Image (cartoon, grey):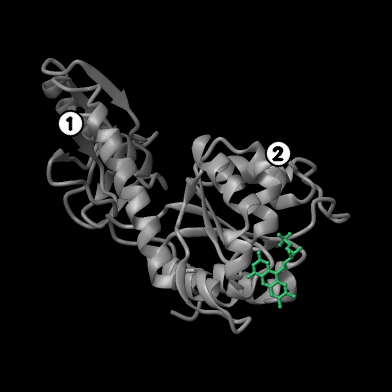
């Protein structure tokens, strides 16, 4: 299981544990995860948006009413973007506001608007953590489906000792990994395509002009490969007919590699009879030469005068 291409929205609130988040973001970026960050105003007192922008390679959102922003519904766009939201560190204040349905800044509004899972990683002084209202807010949030990474026990920045420390960046990273692993398992548990045979086409085709030149297009094949992986997850027997791409199919997918549009047609005709469903996600070339030369055609135009 990898976090590659996973979209992770991190909400940072005003606690000293903000200093741990750049390490987490760097680890996520190393795995090619996409990371967007929302900071509360209080969080920007602990670490600068510039630092977070640099490590996440994305602009950081802080203001609800950004005067320069031309995207009026940014809170909705952000709430629909992520595969998972992680609020880390999560202050007692932010937990309390979200538990009460308060949306008075960008982060709390995005969380109110999202239907994606949200994981809180609380970080606070031991007395704030043990405060009955904090505990009641957490119980309420858990009851309605929010997830929590439990804080650990240890020395605190405020010189107290007790429960309330946010786990280390590598622990948060592993929690995210576990989250996606569990989701993958629950997806494959559904197996709604069990006993179904699915045929999918993907990628471009190449029409050879001569042995070294061809007509093609920029299709990456990503769509067809992603469909094939999901169909496999859902229990289908998957055959993927693919033009030349950089994508790698799971070994459990029957991969038929083709080059030309004619190859594609022949492969589809052959496999089609055996399948329950055909999804055509390939991008066949729109043109083909009248004839393909067996020898490399000699160049006739001198493009570069210095040659
Ligand atoms: C130095 C300092 C450290 C703080 N650390 C925490 C903390 O770890 N957890 C917490 O819940 N509040 C902490 N606070 C208080 C919050 O910053 C404060 O409640 C703030 O209103 C939170 O705003 P936010 O939830 O919108 O980010 C700290 C305040 C200061 C001045």
Closer to the camera in the image, 264 or 136: 136
Q: Residue at x 26, y 40 (%)?
A: 185
Residue 178 coordinates in the image, percent (x, y): 33, 53
Residue 135 coordinates in the image, percent (x, y): 57, 51
Estimate how packed mark 2 is, as few (under 14), some (14 to 19) or many (20 or more) residues with alpha carbons within 10 Å.
few
**Mark seen at residue 238:** 1
Residue 147 coordinates in the image, percent (x, y): 47, 47
Residue 36 coordinates in the image, percent (x, y): 58, 58
**Mark seen at residue 101:** 2
Estimate how packed mark 1 is, as few (under 14), some (14 to 19) or many (20 or more) residues with alpha carbons within 10 Å.
many
Q: Earlier in the sequence, mark 1 or mark 2?
A: 2
Q: CA distance from mark 1 to mark 2?
A: 44 Å
Q: Residue at x 18, y 55 (%)?
A: 295
Image height check: is 160 above or below 43? below
**Residue lying farthest bottom?**
159
Closer to the camera in the image, 286 or 10: 10
Q: Residue at x 20, y 35 (%)?
A: 240
Image height check: is 123 above or below 197? below
Q: Is residue 120 visible?
A: yes
């Amino acid at each position: 299981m990898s976090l590659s291409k996973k979209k992770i929205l991190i909400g940072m609130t005003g606690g000293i544990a903000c200093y741990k988040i750049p390490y987490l973001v760097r680890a996520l970026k190393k795995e090619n995860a996409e990371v967007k960050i929302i900071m509360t105003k209080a969080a920007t007192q602990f670490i600068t948006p510039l630092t977070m922008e640099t490590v996440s390679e994305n602009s950081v959102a802080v203001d609800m009413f950004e005067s320069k922003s031309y995207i009026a519904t940014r809170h909705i766009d952000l709430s629909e973007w992520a595969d998972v939201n992680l609020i880390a560190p999560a202050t007692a204040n932010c937990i309390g506001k979200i538990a009460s349905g308060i949306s008075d800044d960008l982060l709390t509004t995005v969380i109110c608007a999202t239907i994606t899972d949200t994981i809180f990683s609380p970080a606070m002084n031991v007395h704030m953590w043990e405060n009955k209202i904090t505990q009641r807010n957490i119980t309420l949030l858990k009851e309605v489906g929010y997830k929590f990474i439990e804080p650990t026990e240890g020395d605190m920045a405020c010189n107290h000792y007790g429960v309330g420390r946010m786990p280390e960046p590598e622990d948060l990273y592993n929690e995210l990994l576990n989250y996606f692993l569990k989701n993958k398992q629950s997806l494959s548990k559904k197996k709604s395509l069990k006993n179904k045979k699915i045929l999918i086409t993907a990628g471009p085709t190449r029409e050879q002009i001569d042995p070294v030149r061809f007509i093609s297009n920029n299709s990456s094949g990503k769509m067809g490969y992603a469909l094939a992986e999901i169909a496999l997850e859902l229990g289908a027997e998957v055959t993927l007919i693919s033009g030349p791409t950089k994508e790698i199919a799971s070994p459990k997918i029957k991969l038929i590699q083709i080059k030309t549009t004619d190859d594609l047609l022949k492969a589809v005709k052959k496999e089609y009879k055996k399948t329950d469903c055909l999804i055509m996600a390939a991008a066949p070339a729109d043109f083909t030469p009248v004839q393909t030369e067996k020898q490399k055609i000699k160049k006739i135009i001198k493009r570069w005068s210095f040659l």
